[in-house]
Image (spheres, helix red, strand yellow):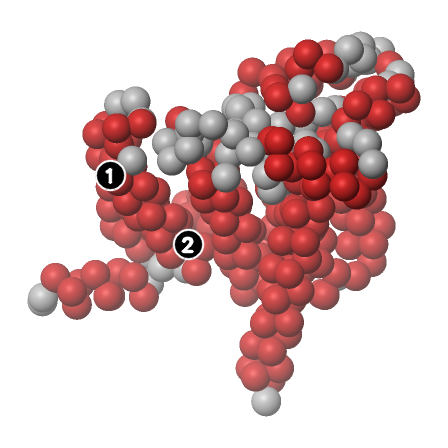
Amino acid sequence: MPVTDTFNTLWNRLKLFDRNLIIYFSLLSLVILIFHQNISQWFGRFLLHLLLICAVIIIIPWLDQKEHPLVRFIRNWYIVFAFPFLYWDVGPLLHAVFPGEFDHLIIQVDRLIFGTLPNIWVQGIVRPGLTDIMQLSYSIYWITIPLGGAIFYFRKEIGHFERLLFYVTFTFFLSYFIFIFFPVAGPRFYLADQIHANYHGFFISNLLRGFVQNVGFRGGAFPSSHVGVAVVILIYVWHFRPRIAQFLFLPLVIALSLATIYGQYHYFTDVLAGLLMGTIIGFRAGRKSRQMLNTAVT
């Protein structure tokens, strides 16, 4: 069988979110090749991404042949477990294209909208109890993806589960490429000398904030991928499980959006861009899924 036919066969057996991952790794490999002079250990990173592409193309179809429930679960959920590693993977590439950062442009937009900078103003309302609430709101974001997927997966609505992950991965990967070509440090880095509020809480804030400080990187603030992905999940779930979306995901998105500014993780414009991106992709996802369902019924 010709190589192209073999590849097409394997490609056609992949799910949409698998294909997103392969396309993303391929484009990332291209970025590494073109801008390798600005990337440490670039050749190793390039080979790693090629290896990951091969792994997805070969191993995932092989897992599809297995019937064991645990194997099926791993095959479908591996991308969710991989999200933290995909985030850390893009970190070393954020200044490969532009060594500088574009915070000054984002700050100008914030001041144009408000006449002042919300990140400076918000320090006046910082209190230990509120910090606990806001930090928990920011951190609880990480459960929105598995929670959104679980709503459909464990109801045996695998089509919805796969389409949701397709649009979630698309939102993440789009955000990561914007990070690379438009790096924005974020207020906790860029405005460090102007942030004097005490962000200690009564309970869990210190632990959560310390964790975020250690795993986060400078340059990935615009747009807020946290907000973008959360909005995609909110809108998609709203199309098919409106009560769950209204009473669970809507409060989470609102709290997350406020917490990103309160905690100095994002500028207002970062959040606004995330909301806009998530809204466009989310409505596209819901409308497309409804069309597919209607076509299947007729």
Q: Does 1 sit left or right of 77 as displayed?
A: left
Q: Does 72 sit left or right of 252 as displayed?
A: left
249, 256: nearer the viewer:
256
Residue depicted at 66% across the width and 47% down the height? 273
Residue 176: % across, % down: 48, 41
Residue depicted at 37% across the width and 31% down the height? 96
197, 152: nearer the viewer:
197
Spatial distance from mark 2 to mark 1, Cα to Cα?
20 Å
Residue 99: % across, % down: 42, 27
Residue 92: quarter of image: top left
5, 42: nearer the viewer:
42
Q: Are marks 2 and 1 in contact (CB under 8 Å)?
A: no
| Crowd rating for badge 1 (residues with CA inside 10 Å; few <14, some 14–19, many 20+) | some
Query: What residue is pinned by disc 1?
Result: 33
Residue 32: quarter of image: top left
Residue 57: % across, % down: 28, 52
The N terminus - image quarter:
bottom left
Secondary structure beneath label 2:
helix
| Crowd rating for badge 2 (residues with CA inside 10 Å; few <14, some 14–19, many 20+) | some
Q: Residue furthest bottom?
A: 298
Amino acid type assigned to the residue bearing label 1 in the image: Leu
Asked if one can make out residue 165 in the rendered structure from this viewpoint, the answer is no
In the rendering, which numbered label is found on residue 82? Answer: none
Mark found first going from the N terminus, 2 or 1: 2
Query: What residue is pinned by disc 2?
Result: 20
255, 28: nearer the viewer:
28
Residue 82: % across, % down: 46, 37
Does 203 sit above or below residue 265? above
Residue depicted at 73% across the width and 15% down the height? 194
